[in-house]
Amino acid sequence: MIHVVWDWNGTLVDDLPIVVESVNVALAAIGEALIDEDDYREHFTRPVDQFYVRLLERPISDREWSTLDRVFHERYGESLDRVPLAADAIDAIDAVEARGWSQSILSMWWEKDLTACVERRGLTERMTLIQGNRDDAGGEKAAHLLLHLSELDVDAASVVMIGDSLDDAAAAGVVGTACVLYDGGSHHRSHLEDAGVPVTDTLMTAVSVAAQLER
Ligand SMILES: [Mg+2]
């Protein structure tokens, strides 16, 4: 049996426009020029402070990072009600359940906000565990995935992570789980393909690909 670990932002929710809008409010707060979705996809990386270093092509001070992080989260939080689920998110969650698999959500977004957002969309009961970020602004996902699997008490070999970012694939690589990347917008597709895991256009296809990985 497979356990699917879903990423939230950019995977189950289609939040790229609001992410870019929130990055722009943050950039404006430190007096920098605005970007578009293409710039975001080209430069996005984790840890997130390195995204801004790549984007601005200069080091950022601790003070700037603190402003960027705070303003981004304030704006993103205010925009939550406008963030739609991905077009086939419910179908994909249904498909996982229909196969008799279990599923959970692991996000790098603040846990309190994540939990409320998942609840508002009626998905809480569908998930074995909903884990967000408790204390690690903008960090890497691997340590969070380890904690997630230990709280779930599942074996890494039975897990398929479905996410939209290179950090999802990197975390899966570190922890030893399978991974399917969904082209939800965080990176250009060619960058996703460099990660060496399957890349799909829809969440339903990601679930079908996960089935082929069942060991
Ligand atoms: Mg994501």
Image: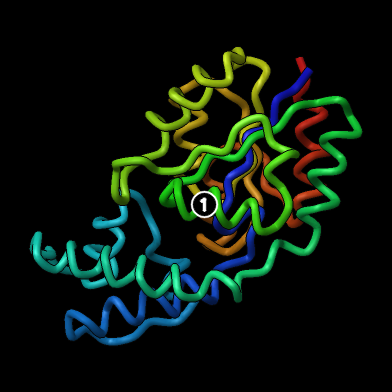
* Mark 1 surroundings: few (<14), some (14-19) or many (≥20) residues within 10 A: many
Secondary structure beneath label 1: helix
Label 1 near ligand 1 (CB < 8 Å):
no
Amino acid tagged 1: Leu
Give the image quarter of residue 22. bottom left
Above or below, 31 relative to 204: below
At horizontal 51% and vertical 61% (from top left) the residue drawn is 186
Q: Position of residue 196 (x, y in %)?
A: 57, 37
Total numbered labels: 1
Closer-to-camera residue (71/141): 71
Closer-to-camera residue (38/34): 34
20 left or right, relative to 58: right
Above or below, 31 relative to 185: below
Above or below, 75 relative to 214: below
At horizontal 52% and vertical 30% (from top left) the residue drawn is 172
88 left or right, relative to 7: right
Query: Which quadrant would the C terminus be assigned to in this image?
Result: top right
At horizontal 39% and vertical 75% (from top left) the residue drawn is 75
Closer-to-camera residue (115/84): 115
Q: Position of residue 122 (x, y in %)?
A: 73, 52
Residue that sits furthest to the right in the current view = 98
Which residue was labeled with disc 1? 114
Q: Position of residue 59 (x, y in %)?
A: 12, 63
Above or below, 109 relative to 4: below
At horizontal 51% and vertical 37% (from top left) the residue drawn is 131
Q: Position of residue 171 (x, y in %)?
A: 46, 33
Query: Which quadrant would the N terminus be assigned to in this image?
Result: top right
User: What sort of colour scheme is used for the picture?
Assistant: rainbow
